Image (cartoon, rainbow, N blue to C red):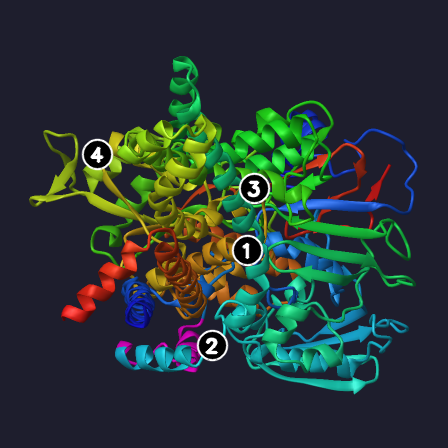
């Protein structure tokens, strides 16, 4: 078990480093730099003295060779310091710390909704004996996956905010403001969970142990939930881990449509302004969340299916 | 207001005014006229205004984006104000001023009894502290720094008199003192580091005080009680009508429109042509005004071999059908360019005859320059095709459709155009590097000196103009305080630029806001931004 954990941890650090490095290189390959980006921000605000730009570039260290900049940034980042935003001058860590709670609320609520709705749909679709209902329910997830998130968001706003006045159209205020964005974000996520879970539930229900359970006289619900669902949930759990990354990405769209503050908005603004320190911070942080979630899920597997660790340890023992 | 023809009655003014009166009254109301409802102004209430973006900064001296200027402008006063109708500079914090003959020395006599919201007094020393700090503002302060460039010293003559001296003549400085960028902040504020001013906001003497700033979300301002030194242009004396202003950041245009219609906000910015239909009729007024300054058009790289030939440039000028472009792409009320300056700029000259669409003239100019039409319709000379690139940046939704029309129109006279899209962040470096044929751009500024900044061959000269008599006119207008003489020199400069086609003006940028009918007197200032001191809800 210890080897298994250490190996997963090493992989996690590797992923973090790779994400940081790749994003740094990509940002540096883009033409221009944050200083010229800032100078052209309004675009109509007139001409800028080139000498002043050069001085600013020097101040932020953008005139150094790329490798030196990379080493500087990485060294600081390892110590948890991502520097200051070029556009606003605020430390990156406090910008992220301010935005994080909002995004955690949003993604937390979204994943909860996604698991409940997606899981519920999968269980119901595989449980029902009515063919037409099953067909109907199973056709929903592909629809949910394929409609664009911003469209779902605008539709929900139009319906529940502009027409029915049930929820506010924008802002981070309270639980009411959370409903529509979380629902928007939960649609594609829940749909994917439903797809995977329904498929693996159907497979599980064909297995011999289900026959055995039935033969022993277990009720339909009991067979469905205790026996089949437990085994079928493993692939769905893997998907949830991957979806965390997708949720963070989805927050860029959802936070923009619903005018919510959060990591997504910070990311969108930073990318537009080519604010390298902030983008780097976001990438490193997003990778950290992704890696941590997947690490936790890797560690849950053995609890659900003891064979996973045994296999891993046996391989380790042989090596 | 955009339809108001000019500042100094040109020949066609009466006719144009007659023709456009109806448009004016319905479409471009300056608040009072167009808004119905209760007629008596009353105090109190909260105005909620949805803007499209947040610049991440609440220091008036450091913001350049209109969306942020709308709010932070209300927290500071300026030395002077500029009448949006006449372009005239009028008193605000300065009761009066003297300028020496060659426009190198500006002496301001300050109003007494003005206090900042921290209780400190406005004195000559405070103004000096502000102007001394501006050059050190860093990257975000480029606008303010430009206004003060070439400053030699700011000196305190007596507690209420301050003198600003420049190394070179700088006539634009008077207008510059009316801008938000040179809004006066308390001495305590200007001593802070620029980034701190950005995130914490500043102490000003304005009619509203910053209460709360939540980045990317909202800016909340409260009425300054006891305010009694408003601009001489405002109709209400003393404090503002409104108790509170809340600016919400709502990036999605559709959500802004829906929020206004469903009464969740009282006013919205950045209303495009696509939103007009949804907002037409009902409880909403559309407010429009052309931005002063250099109009949207093709900035010409005059050093490029193909574009060095004046006939080719003039052919481009004549080949563009400006009316078709404004009618097809831009919001209602947008005017085709009639000079290199917008009509709302002081000393604007109407050159619409020079900018008339004339495809036949364009063709004959190209023929005369030796460009003969090939089999594919594209002209060529000495085996070389007449092919040009227009660089553009997605800072407005109208850019691409407008340029696609330009592309078609130029093709019709035999000029091949390739559209090259860049990132907004590359704009400055594109101009500096000079790697462009034509570039789609504009500059908002309500002083004609913007012509010198943009087109003098003695300054940055991003458009690579040769040294000509244009330089003389441009530096001449910067060095005179005689308004008639300045007008005449600016007039000459506009003619030289347009007739030599150093720039190809196309369309005036128009600011369009949508405001609930219960909001009254939400007025544009000279820069086509807003003042909210006189605004009331009822």
Would you identify the image quadrant in which residue B119 lies?
bottom right
Q: Are marks 1 and 3 in contact (CB under 8 Å)?
A: no
Cα distance between the residues tagged 4 and 3: 52 Å
- What kind of element bears circle 1? helix
Q: Nearer the viewer, mark 1 or mark 2?
A: 1
- Residue placed under numbered mark 4 in the picture: B414
The quarter of the rendered structure image containing the C terminus of chain B is top right
Residue beneath the point at 23% across and 59% down: A311
User: Where is B49 relative to B97, above or below?
Assistant: above
User: What's the CA distance linking mark 1 and mark 3?
Assistant: 12 Å
Indicate which label's residue lies in the foreground, 2 or 4: 2
**Camera sees residue B332:** no
Q: Give the residue drawn at x 57%, y 74%.
A: B169
The chain containing the residue under callout 1 comes to A
Q: Does residue A65 belong to the magenta stretch?
A: yes
Give SS at disc 3.
helix
Which chain does the numbered disc 3 sit on? A
Figure check: B40 above or below A60: above
The residue sitting at the front extreme is A216
Stretch of the chain drawn in magenta: A49-66
Q: Earlier in the sequence, mark 1 or mark 2?
A: 2
- Mark 1 Cα-neighbour bin, 10 Å: few <14, some 14–19, many ≥20: some
Q: Which residue corresponds to mark 3?
A: A181
Image x and y of residue B323, in percent: 46, 30
Q: Quadrant of the N terminus of chain B?
A: top right
> According to the image, label 2 marks what residue?
A83
Measured Cα–Cα span from mark 1 to mark 2: 23 Å
């Amino acid at each position: 078990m210890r080897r298994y954990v250490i190996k997963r941890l090493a992989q996690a650090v590797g992923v973090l480093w790779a994400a940081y490095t790749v994003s740094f290189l990509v940002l540096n390959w883009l033409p221009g730099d944050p200083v010229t980006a800032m100078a052209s921000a309004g675009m109509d605000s007139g001409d800028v003295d080139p000498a002043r730009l050069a001085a600013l570039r020097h101040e932020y260290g953008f005139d150094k060779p790329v490798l030196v900049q990379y080493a500087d940034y990485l060294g600081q980042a390892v110590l948890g310091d991502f520097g200051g935003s070029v556009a606003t001058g605020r430390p990156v860590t406090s910008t992220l710390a301010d935005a994080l709670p909002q995004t955690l609320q949003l993604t937390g609520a979204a994943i909860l909704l996604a698991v409940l709705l997606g899981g519920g749909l999968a269980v119901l679709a595989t449980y029902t004996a009515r063919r037409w209902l099953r067909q109907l329910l199973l056709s929903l997830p592909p629809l949910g996956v394929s409609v664009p998130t911003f469209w779902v968001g605008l539709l929900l706003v139009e319906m529940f905010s502009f027409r029915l006045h049930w929820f506010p159209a924008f802002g981070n205020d309270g639980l009411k403001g959370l409903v529509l964005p979380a629902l928007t974000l939960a649609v594609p996520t829940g749909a994917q969970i439903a797809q995977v879970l329904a498929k693996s539930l159907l497979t599980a229900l064909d297995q011999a142990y289900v026959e055995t359970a039935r033969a022993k006289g277990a009720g339909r619900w009991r067979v469905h939930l205790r026996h089949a669902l437990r085994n079928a949930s493993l692939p769905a759990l893997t998907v949830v881990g991957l979806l965390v990354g997708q949720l963070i990405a989805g927050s860029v769209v959802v936070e923009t449509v619903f005018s919510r503050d959060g990591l997504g908005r910070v990311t969108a603004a930073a990318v537009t302004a080519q604010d390298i320190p902030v983008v780097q911070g976001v990438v490193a942080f997003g990778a950290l969340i992704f890696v941590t979630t997947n690490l936790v899920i890797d560690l849950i597997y053995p609890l659900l299916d003891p064979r996973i660790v045994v296999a891993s340890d046996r391989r380790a023992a042989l090596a | 207001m955009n339809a108001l023809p000019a500042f100094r009655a040109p020949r066609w003014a009466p006719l144009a005014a007659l023709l456009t009166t109806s448009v004016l009254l319905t479409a471009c109301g300056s608040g009072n006229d167009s808004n119905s409802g209760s007629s008596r102004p009353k105090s109190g209430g909260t105005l909620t205004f949805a803007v499209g973006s947040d610049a991440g900064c609440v220091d008036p001296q450091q913001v350049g984006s209109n969306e942020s200027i709308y709010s932070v402008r209300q927290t500071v006063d300026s030395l002077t104000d500029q009448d949006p109708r006449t372009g005239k500079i009028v008193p605000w914090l300065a009761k009066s001023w003297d300028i020496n003959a060659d426009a190198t020395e500006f002496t301001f006599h300050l109003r007494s009894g003005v206090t900042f919201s921290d209780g400190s007094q406005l004195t000559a020393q405070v103004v000096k502290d502000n102007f001394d700090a501006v050059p050190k503002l860093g990257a975000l302060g480029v606008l303010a720094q430009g206004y003060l460039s070439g400053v030699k010293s700011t000196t305190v003559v007596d507690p209420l008199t301050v003198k600003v001296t420049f190394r070179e003549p700088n006539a634009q400085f008077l207008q510059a003192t009316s801008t938000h960028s040179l809004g006066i902040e308390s001495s305590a504020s200007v001593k802070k580091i620029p980034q701190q001013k950005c995130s914490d906001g500043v102490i000003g003497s304005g009619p509203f005080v910053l209460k709360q700033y939540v980045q990317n979300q909202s800016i909340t301002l409260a009425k300054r009680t006891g305010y009694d030194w408003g601009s001489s242009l405002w109709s209400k004396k003393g404090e503002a009508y409104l108790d509170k202003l809340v600016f919400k950041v709502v990036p999605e245009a559709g959500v802004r429109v829906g929020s206004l219609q469903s009464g969740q906000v009282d006013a919205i910015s950045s209303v495009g042509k696509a939103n007009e239909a949804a907002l037409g009729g009902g409880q909403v007024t559309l407010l429009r005004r052309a931005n002063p300054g250099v109009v949207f058009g093709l900035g010409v790289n005059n050093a490029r071999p193909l574009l060095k030939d004046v006939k080719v440039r003039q052919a481009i000028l004549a080949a563009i059908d400006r009316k078709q472009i404004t009618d097809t792409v831009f919001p209602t009320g947008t005017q085709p360019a009639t000079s290199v300056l917008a009509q709302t700029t002081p000393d604007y000259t109407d050159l619409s005859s020079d900018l008339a669409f004339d495809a036949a003239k364009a063709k004959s100019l190209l023929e005369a320059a030796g460009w003969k039409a090939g089999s594919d319709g594209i002209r060529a000379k000495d085996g070389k095709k007449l092919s040009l690139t227009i660089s553009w940046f997605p800072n407005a939704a109208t850019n691409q459709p407008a340029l696609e029309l330009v592309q078609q129109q130029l093709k019709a006279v035999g000029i091949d155009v390739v559209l090259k899209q860049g990132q907004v962040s590359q704009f400055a470096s594109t101009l500096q590097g000079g790697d462009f044929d034509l570039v789609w751009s504009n500059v908002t500024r309500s002083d004609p000196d913007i012509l010198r900044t943009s087109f003098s061959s003695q300054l940055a000269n991003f458009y690579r103009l040769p040294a000509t008599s244009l330089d003389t006119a441009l530096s001449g207008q910067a060095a005179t305080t005689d308004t008639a003489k300045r007008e005449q020199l600016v007039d000459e400069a506009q003619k030289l630029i347009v007739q030599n086609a150093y720039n190809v003006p196309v369309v005036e940028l128009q600011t369009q806001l949508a405001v609930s009918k219960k909001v009254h007197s939400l007025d544009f200032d000279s820069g086509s931004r807003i003042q909210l001191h006189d605004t009331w809800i009822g």
